[in-house]
Image (cartoon, helix red, strand yellow):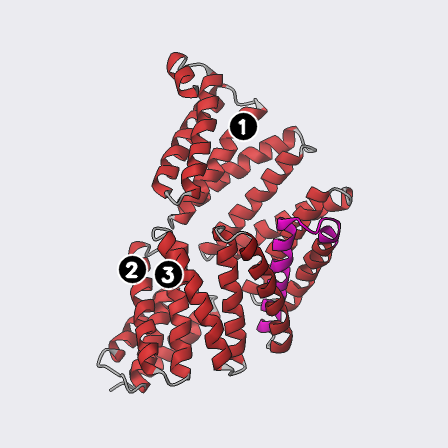
Amino acid sequence: MRIYLYEKYPQNLNSKTGLSISFSKLGDTHLSLGDFEKAKKFYLESNRLAGEVYSQDPRNEFVIGNLAVTFERLGNIISMSGKLNNALNLYENYNFLYNELYNISPKNEKYIRGLSLSFERLGDTYIFLGKMEEGGKYYFQKHLFSQDLYKKHPLNLSFQHGFVISSLKLADFLIKIGKPEVAIKYSMEGLNIVKKLLDSNPKNGNYKKDLAISYLKLGESYQLMNDFENALFYFKQNNSLEKELNESSPKDVETKNKLAVSYLKLGNTYQSINDFESALMNFVEYHKLEEELYLSFPDLIDYKYNFALSNAYLAVTYSKLGKFDNALTFYEKDLSLVRQLYNSFPDNIEFKKGLAFSLKSIGCFHEISPKANSKWKQYYYESKDIFEQLNLEFPNERVFKQELDFLKELVKNLY
């Protein structure tokens, strides 16, 4: 019907807006089915039409909101394809438009949520680009914004929940930059509020998800502080909740992904205390879930990268247990997948870093294992070259400097 109206009245702003909304919904449907190319096509058409309407009616709040949503949807799909700089431009437009709406009507909850989400999208994208300082600014901005709303309206459930999300997002950032003690403060802040929310509404799935994230962030913080007893306690709490959420929604991709992460965290912690059998049991579960996700969505690069990592964790653990045939199989799978990702997206810092570490790991394995081959020196040289590039791009990142110094010393003594 909306296509008919648009074809009959192509210059009518209402018919254009209606068709834009229809295209956006079609994009959502194709995205949920895993057809990312069709989703992107419909989001682009939705954005084009919404932009035409906005250019003719730039003060209409509904028009501004519709265009903002199309930028966010496009940003999400472009981000999934690995084009982070393009996604960043789209999220900046999204943020600009919701700033407009918020300035027009600062008490409108929809505008408040949209502006808050735009801070999060920008923060996430800067972090993925390796720009930690810029990403952190947006996370702190989101948290201050959410905290102010929560303090002014302490009984508003939406603002309470928004404050929980901002606290946990900030905790995640602080963990990434190596400040676990401060991260614990924000994780506990989120945990205490979400427990109260759950007490009043125990069947709310979103509150359960946030409780699971609170446990996860506390576990990660204690793990970073080498307090493995507390880390295991919180990771087990997280895993238990994620299993419950996955069982209630077995087809939900997000819950499956989070359950996979919970097994990864347990495996890592058991490995840290040299309990490699327990680590292996959890890494096997992690690998199984990541493989399911990757096979369901082979074009989604995040799942491909996570599947590569699951192979790496199994490789290391099998090697520790002396099962070298198994270890070699998984090292080679990991390297193949990460190399494919890096070749497709050479500007992606995570893939570049992942390839450098994969090459170093398989080089170490071939150097010391009974399954050694003549390629191990080549792996070291290639890893060193990539760490040299990373060190030039990020001179303040200590881990790149440490890895580069180690590999330089190692290759110097190869002959």
**Neighbours of disc 1 within 10 Å: few (<14), some (14-19), many (20+):** many
Q: Is residue 216 above or below residue 223?
A: above
Q: Quadrant of the N terminus?
A: top left
Q: Of the residues under marks 1 and 2, which one precedes in the sequence?
A: 1
Seen from the viewer's position, the closer of residues 286 and 409 is 286
Label 3 sits on a secondary structure element that is helix
Q: Residue at x 49, y 17 (%)?
A: 14
Main SS category, magenta section: helix
Alpha-carbon distance for marks 1 and 3?
36 Å
| Three-letter amino acid code of the residue under disc 3 | Phe
Image spot of residue 83 (x, y percent): 38, 48
Q: Is residue 348 visible?
A: no
Residue 64 badge: 1
Side of 203 where 284 appears, left or right: left
List the single residue furthest toward the top: 8
The magenta-colored residue range is: 196-224
Based on the picture, tell me whether residue 211 belongs to the magenta stretch: yes
Disc 2 target residue: 340
